[in-house]
Amino acid sequence: SRAVAMAEEPVKAILVEVSFSTEEKIRLKVKKSTTLFKILKAVSDRKGLDIESFRRTYRLLIEGKRVKTTSSTNLEVPLSAVLKDAGTEPDVDTVEIEARQEQEGGSAASE
């Protein structure tokens, strides 16, 4: 039957849900082979930021583990490798990424 054939097929697309502290969520459907760069580019475009501004403004976490977005090498890895590094099951169909605003160092001195 068709249902059995569909159940045996591997998951081809993953829903990536990027959530922000403002309760905003950006959802993307991607393949496991999609690079982190493409995901960040799509999210930053929707936020109205260029990718460098997005990388400076937000830090990304998957299951509480920080996703390194500091070098271009880190951005060329496929989503499947990012999930593996975060300790997430490779056959998931939904990935939640938390985007936290970077905290600036130091404190403001009042005069």
Image: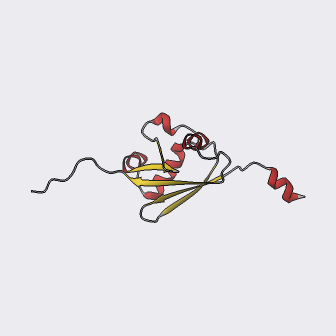
Give the x, y percent position of residue 43: 49, 54
Q: Residue sitting at 36 percent across and 50 percent down?
A: 102
Please identify the residue farthest to the top as the structure is shown: 73
Q: Residue furthest left?
A: 111
Q: Position of residue 91 (x, y in %)?
A: 68, 48
Q: Nearer the viewer, residue 87 or 83?
A: 87
Q: Residue at x 55, y 37 (%)?
A: 77
Residue drawn at 53 percent across, 43 percent down: 36
- Work out whether residue 47 or residue 81 is closer to the camera in this orientation and state it: 81
Q: Is residue 49 left or right of residue 95?
A: left
In the rendered image, the quadrant that contains the N terminus is bottom right
Q: Can residue 41 be seen at all in this image of the molecule? A: no
Viewport quadrant of the C terminus: bottom left
- Please say which color scheme the image uses: secondary structure
Residue 18 visible somewhere in the drawing: yes
Q: Quadrant of residue 94?
A: bottom right
How many numbered marks appear?
0
Relative placement, left or right, of 21 versus 18 is left
Give coordinates of residue 19: x percent, y percent. Answer: 49, 59
Query: Which one is in front, 73 or 65?
Result: 65
The x, y position of residue 12, in whole percent, is: 70, 49
Furthest residue in direction right, as rendered:
1
Question: Most extreme residue toward the bottom, as rendered?
Answer: 23
Examine the rendered structure and indicate whether residue 68 appears above or below residue 15: above
Q: Is residue 39 shown left or right of residue 32?
A: left
Residue at position x 46%, y 49% in the image: 60
Compared to residue 72, the image places residue 30 above or below, namely below
In front here: 75 or 93? 93
